[in-house]
């Protein structure tokens, strides 16, 4: 479940106090609910259990947000998305009005992607990211903070974006075995007790076993540097992490005006030694920054 909070002003509320006695415990309960809701339930035992957990989590988050808005006397709306790209359409519709607005993306990297793409063209918009998804890779650089006060009172900063195929990415773009892993992780999330980082790891192992790791790319950097070879993957990073916690570009910063390109060649050792040849991938890495 994802939702966006549409705050109709960009004012900060430095003088406001959170009335609950233990806001940290509340946030921990919130994340605990999320984890339970993401654990697939064995359909042979109780197919309705997961739906019940998800519904409880939805109600809990919405109630928490509504109480916070009321306590802080904020001029804000709650919006629950109903389908893929629905968040993008909703955000752009609001952004087009031209009024100052801060969108709070409450979900994972996919939710953030939709919110950013819906409003990045409009200078009247700001985006805050409350990490409640399974991966939350972009937020890792900022500490994955879920405290609502911090987000409401936060000072906005300008960040870079990566333009690709008519849209923008705020975290990264990747091709190769990375894309295969991302495409397959959803299937592993359907297994009992598998979610988030575990799903990405299982999908990666599956790609290795099935041999879906060799890709021939021609990559041009800065219009004059051309690399053409067999690669495992190519990571174009605005930030450092992806795939549920894998650090691909340790030096990347989303506000330095640069993108980090990490290319890992397909090692000949794999053809000779199979999976064990992967241990030599590190010696084949090329980094351009």
Image (cartoon, rainbow, N blue to C red):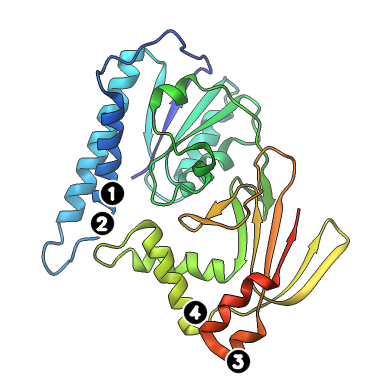
Q: Earlier in the sequence, mark 2 or mark 4?
A: 2
Determine whether the residue tagged by mark 1 lies in a helix, strand or loop.
helix
The answer to the question of whether label 2 and label 4 lie on touching residues, with beta carbons closer than 8 A, is no
Dot 2 or dot 3: first in sequence order is 2
Mark 3 element type? helix
Q: Position of residue 47 (x, y in %)?
A: 15, 61
Viewer can see residue 90: yes
Q: Which residue does the numbered mark 1 point to in the structure image?
A: 35
Residue 17 place in picture, x, y as percent: 36, 12
Q: Which mark is residue 272?
A: 3
Q: Nearer the viewer, residue 1 or 18?
A: 18
Q: Residue at x 74, y 41 (%)?
A: 257
* Image quadrant assignment for residue 121: top right
Please say if 216 is above or below 147. Answer: below
Q: Vertically, is 241 above or below 158?
A: below
Q: Residues within 10 Å of mark 2 (few under 14, many from 20)?
A: some
Q: CA distance from mark 3 to mark 4?
A: 14 Å
Disc 1 and disc 4 in contact, CB within 8 angstroms: no
In the image: residue 188, left or right of residue 50: right
What mark, if any, has residue 16 been given in the picture? Answer: none
Residue 78 percent location from the top left of the image: 37, 29
Mark nearer the N terminus (1 vs 3): 1
Residue at the disc numbered 4: 208
Q: Earlier in the sequence, mark 3 or mark 4?
A: 4
- Provide the residue designation for mark 2: 39
Classify mark 4: residues with Cα within 10 Å, few (<14), some (14-19) or many (20+): some
């Amino acid at each position: 479940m994802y939702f966006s909070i549409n705050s109709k002003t960009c004012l900060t509320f430095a003088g406001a106090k959170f009335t609950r006695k233990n806001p940290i415990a509340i946030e921990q309960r919130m994340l605990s609910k999320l984890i339970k809701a993401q654990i697939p339930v064995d359909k042979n035992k109780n197919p309705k259990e997961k739906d019940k957990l998800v519904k409880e989590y939805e109600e809990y988050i919405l109630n928490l947000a509504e109480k916070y808005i009321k306590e802080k006397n904020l001029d804000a709306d709650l919006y629950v998305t109903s389908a893929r790209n629905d968040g993008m359409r909703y955000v752009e519709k609001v952004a087009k009005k031209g009024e100052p607005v801060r969108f709070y993306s409450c979900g994972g990297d996919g939710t953030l992607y939709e919110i950013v793409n819906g409003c990045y063209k409009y200078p009247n918009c700001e985006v805050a990211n409350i990490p409640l998804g399974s991966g939350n890779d972009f937020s890792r650089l900022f500490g994955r903070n879920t405290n609502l006060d911090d987000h409401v009172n936060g000072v906005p900063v300008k960040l870079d974006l990566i333009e690709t195929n008519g849209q923008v990415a705020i975290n990264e773009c990747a091709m190769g075995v990375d894309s295969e892993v991302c495409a397959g992780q959803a299937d592993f999330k359907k297994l009992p007790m598998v979610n988030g980082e575990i799903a990405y790891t299982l999908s990666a192992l599956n790609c290795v076993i099935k041999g879906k790791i060799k890709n021939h790319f021609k990559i041009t950097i800065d219009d004059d540097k051309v690399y053409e070879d067999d690669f495992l993957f190519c990571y174009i990073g605005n930030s450092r992490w992806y795939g549920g916690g894998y650090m691909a570009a340790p030096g990347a910063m989303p506000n330095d005006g640069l993108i980090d390109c990490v290319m890992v060649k397909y090692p000949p050792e794999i053809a000779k030694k199979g999976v064990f040849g992967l241990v030599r991938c590190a010696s084949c890495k090329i980094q351009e920054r």
